[in-house]
Each structure stands twice: as C-alpha cells, then as structure tokens.
C-alpha cells in the first residue's frame, strides 16, 4: 500500500498533533506520514512541535485574506501542492468553506471534544464544550473523530470514546481528561484506519472493515 501523505491543520498548542507525531514514531499510523503541518496563526507552539519532529510547516494566516472563500482557495492550493491524501484538523480554529469538503470528500477529519451530536456545532469549541457539558450535568462525555462536511461537526462519525465526568470537575480538568483518555487515543487510531484503507462511508455511516 502506498504511503499516505497526512497534512495536519493547527491553530494553537498542538497537543493532538503531538499525539499523531508520537503515534507515527511508534509506527502506528498504518503507513501514513505527516508530511506538512499548516497553521492559521504564526508563532504557535504546534509549529515548534512540527519543527522538532522534522516536519515541514507552512503558515497561512486567515487575516491576510479578505474572506473565507479566498482563504479556503489558498488552503486548497496548499493541499494540492502538498499532495494531501488525508487532512486532519487538530485544534484548527478557522472556518473553511464547502469547496474544501467537496475537493476532499471523506478525506478530511476532525476531532471534537464531546460525544456528537451532544455539545457540537456553532460556538462549541475549546473550553466552551466542557463548560456546556458540566452545566448540563452529564455523567459521561468524551470525544468524536468525524469526517468534515459542510455541516459544522455534522460529518460521518468515525470513532467515539466515552469519558466519565467526576464530581468537582472544572472545565479545565475535564478538558485535560478528555484529551488524555479519548482525543489522543482515537485520533491516531482513526488516521491509522484511514491509511490502511479500512474505512468506508455509505449514507453518512462509517463502517470499519476488519
């Protein structure tokens, strides 16, 4: 099976990027290779993580472009230049338009820090997700890896993992537990399954082949 080129999109610290880098170093990405990390912001720690791992980086700053369409067009050009087989949004906080999803159907995945369809969609990102979960009093939360479509957090679900909510949790404590117990495990696993060509999508349902 040919190597799959993985492009990782970041906007911040890059903890999920690190989970992917670590998985690749252990040979757990199923023949996939992180060939480029693209950040929507300069100077973020994710870029340092990539550089330390010897991964090429690019910075495509949102405010350098007049609108979402122009920014998305620049990103699309970058994906094509990088010969992307899989695009992973790992804490990428910038909106891309539908041209990207259409160019890479079921080839772009995102990790969301909740069990979709709970606490997802517009406005649910970062700590806001965990604040909402605690406010609702849920006993179980978790993370979801899904393919990216035009609907925010609405694409086909690849993997999910549940995480218990503990008494006395703050949004920060819960965020850390969800990352450690769910996000950092299921994101590399989803990437591996993709690179091993074990994911198929029909009618918005993802099937994992044995």
Image: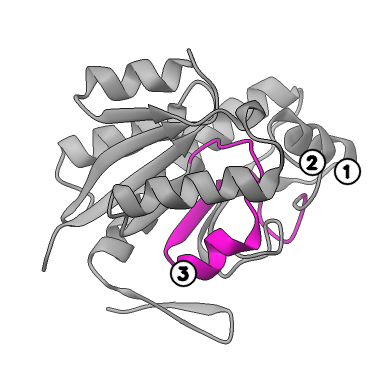
* Residue placed most toward the observer, 74 or 162: 74
SS label for mark 1: helix
Q: Secondary structure at mark 3?
A: loop
Find the distance from the CA under tag 2 to the CA under tag 1: 5 Å
Cα distance in 3D space between marks 2 and 3: 28 Å
* Residue annotated with mark 2: 133
Which of labels 1 and 3 is toward the front?
A: 3
Examine the residues drawn in magenta and state their main secondary structure.
Answer: loop
Residue linked to disc 3: 106
Asked whether, in this view, residue 61 is left or right of residue 14, the answer is right
Q: Quadrant of residue 194?
A: bottom left
Considering the image in quadrants, where does the N terminus appear?
bottom left
**Is residue 111 shown to the viewer in this render?**
yes
Q: CA distance from mark 1 to mark 3?
A: 32 Å
Viewer-side label of 2, 3 = 3
Q: Is residue 106 left or right of residue 149?
A: left
Residue located 60% across and 42% down the image = 71
Q: Residue at x 68, y 21 (%)?
A: 172
Residue 106 horizontal/vertical position (percent): 46, 69
């Amino acid at each position: 099976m040919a190597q799959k080129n993985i492009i990782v999109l970041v906007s911040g610290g890059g903890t999920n990027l690190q989970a992917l880098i670590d998985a690749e170093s252990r040979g757990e990405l199923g023949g996939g290779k992180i060939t480029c990390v693209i950040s929507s912001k300069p100077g973020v720690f994710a870029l340092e993580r990539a550089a330390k791992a010897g991964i090429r980086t690019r910075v495509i700053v949102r405010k350098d472009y007049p609108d979402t369409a122009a920014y998305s067009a620049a990103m699309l050009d970058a994906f094509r230049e990088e010969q992307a087989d899989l695009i992973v949004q790992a804490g990428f906080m910038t909106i891309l338009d539908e041209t990207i999803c259409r160019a890479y159907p079921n080839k772009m995945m995102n990790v969301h820090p909740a069990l979709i369809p709970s606490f997802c969609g517009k406005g649910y990102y970062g700590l806001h997700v965990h604040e909402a979960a605690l406010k609702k009093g849920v006993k179980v939360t978790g993370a979801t890896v899904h393919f990216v479509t035009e609907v925010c957090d609405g694409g086909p679900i690849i993997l999910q993992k549940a995480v218990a909510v503990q008494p006395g949790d703050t949004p920060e404590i819960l965020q850390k537990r969800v990352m450690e117990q769910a996000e950092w495990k299921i994101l590399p696993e989803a990437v591996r399954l993709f690179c091993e060509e074990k994911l198929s999508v029909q009618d918005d349902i993802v099937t994992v082949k044995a």
